[in-house]
Image (cartoon, rainbow, N blue to C red):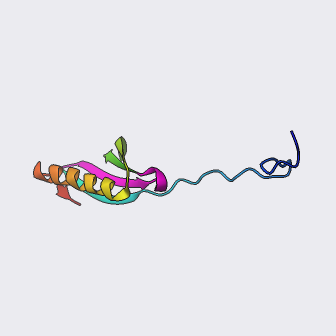
Amino acid sequence: MNDDHPSYSPYKRAAPPRQPQPDEYLWTLTRGTERRRAEVRDFHDLGAELQIYVNDEFVSAQRYPTRALAALAGNAIREAYEHEGWKRG
């Protein structure tokens, strides 16, 4: 390989490992001793993911084109839970 090639350098350092972005908390609902929580993880150009937790254990995720759509879906899920008797907190 030619050492003059712009993408090759024996002295070039590898990029640092990608740091995960923290989740954005949306809501927590309780009923008795059970808890449900929703968070959105933003992947910038790749969209956003709505993550659902039951008693602090991850149970599901759904990817959306934008963070706004993920938050909207999370709010719809919250409303459905509240309709079933779950309370905020």
Looking at the picture, how far across and down is residue 35, in whole percent?
A: 26, 50
Left or right position of 25 against 87: right
Looking at the picture, how far across and down is residue 59, in whole percent?
A: 34, 40
Query: Would residue 30 be seen by someone viewing this image from the given angle?
Result: no
Residue 59 versus residue 79 in the image, above or below: above
Residue plotted at (26% across, 52% down)? 73
Which residue appears farthest toward the right when viewing the image?
3
Residue plotted at (87% across, 49% down)? 4
Residue nearest the viewer, comparing 57 with 16: 16
Residue 77 versus residue 59 in the image, above or below: below
The C terminus, quarter of image = bottom left
Left or right position of 71 against 6: left
Residue 46 included in the magenta stretch of the image: yes
The count of marks equals 0
Residue plotted at (35% across, 43% down)? 62
Query: Would residue 69 be seen by someone viewing this image from the given angle?
Result: yes
Residue nearest the viewer, comparing 86 with 52: 52
Q: Quadrant of residue 29?
A: bottom left
Residue 81 included in the magenta stretch of the image: no
Left or right position of 34 against 58: left
Residue plotted at (17% across, 50% down)? 81
Left or right position of 16 against 56: right
The N terminus, quarter of image = top right
Query: What's drawn in magenta, residue-wise?
Result: 32-47
Looking at the picture, how far across and down is residue 76, in whole percent?
A: 20, 53
Looking at the picture, how far across and down is residue 66, in whole percent?
A: 37, 55
